[in-house]
Image (spheres, grey):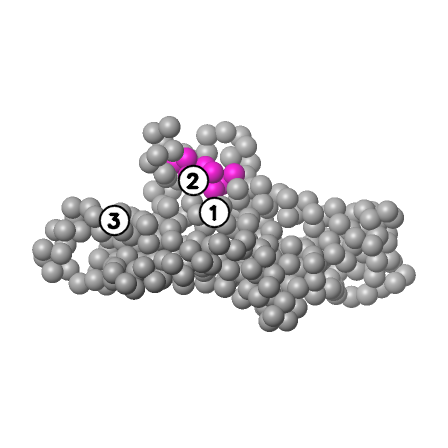
Amino acid sequence: MIKRWWSFPKTNVERTAIVLGCLILLLALVGAFLVPFDPMKIDFRAKLQAPSLVHWLGTDGSGRDVLSRLLYGAQLTLASTFAVIIVVVTIGCTIGIASAFIGGAVDNMLMRLADIWLGFPPLILALGFASALGASLEAAIWALIFSWWPNYARLSRMVTSDILSQKFIASADALGVPTHRKVLHYVIPNAMDVMLIQIALDISAVMLAISGLSFIGVGAQIPAPEWGAMIADGRSYVSNGWWIVLAPGLAIFITAVSFNVIGDMLRRELDPTSRRR
């Protein structure tokens, strides 16, 4: 299985994206233990210092070490991203699979609700929810969960309906296989490839949404070392402290591009239609 997955990358760009993605995830796990300075400690004597051997990425307007905040913020930003992904996949797939199995009026009602939800741009919808819940990172996470679940509900319902039309499901029905076993042994394994593609593509989208909400003031609040909040905090010093916004901006850019490339690679390798093309 590992050998099969390792054969997926075909170009140096894809190999680089995988390495960067793994490195970013590793930094999110252990970065908080590697910080050279306290990411929240204010030292006005060291404010707006350019990158040096002491402060590799310089200091911000309050004298805090940018590298320490960047490493600590990796955990904060990516943990929030994966929290949103895990919850929306769980909620959306549960609704989608249940809708496909139940069918009839319940199926129509759930899918029409998802269609209404999808009629609004997710970021605008999340902005409204976050504003109503109060400006905080937790509010941004819940706002994105409320606005993102219909994507997985529609996708899982479509995939499940396709699986239920297969002959092996008819054989399982003839043998009296209970519904929960069909879900666990037939639906989930066969839907896993499609879900992995969508998750890989959504990681960057959700991370950008969280950072965007923090940047405009309805997500993580300054001075939290979340990457979007770091950019918002440093925008007043762009002329004489460009490194303050450059570091988190590059971190967001590299993370988003890496996971987008990985998602495109998975789509090419796991989607039968893409493989035929």
Q: Is residue 146 one of those drawn in magenta?
A: no
> Quick one: 60 or 55, which is closer to the camera?
60
Report the residue at 42% width, 55% height from top. Answer: 115
The earlier-in-sequence mark between 2 and 3 is 3
Quadrant of residue 76 in the image? Answer: bottom right
Quadrant in which residue 276 is drawn: top left
Name which of mark 2 and mark 1 comes first in the sequence: 1
Identify the residue position indicated by label 1 in the image: 200
Residue 277 vs 137, above or below: the answer is above
Instruction: Provide residue 45's location: percent of width, then percent of height.
Output: 90, 61
Quadrant of the image containing the C terminus = top left
Name the outermost residue toward the left. 174
Is there a contact, CB below 8 Å, between mark 1 and mark 3? Answer: no
Q: Which residue is mark 2?
A: 266
What residue sits right under mark 3 in the picture? 163
> What is the distance, in whole Å, between disc 2 and disc 3 at their CAs?
20 Å
| Residue type (three-letter) at the residue carrying disc 3 | Ile
Distance (Cα) linking label 2 and label 1: 8 Å
Q: Which residues are magenta?
A: 261-269
State whether the magenta stretch is mostly helix, strand or loop: helix
Against 106, residue 240 (above or below) is above
Q: Residue at x 59, y 57 (%)?
A: 124
Give SS at disc 3: helix
Q: Which of label 2 and label 3 is nearer to you? A: 3
Rendered location of residue 20, percent (x, y): 57, 42
Q: Amino acid at mark 1?
A: Ala
Tag 1, which secondary structure? helix
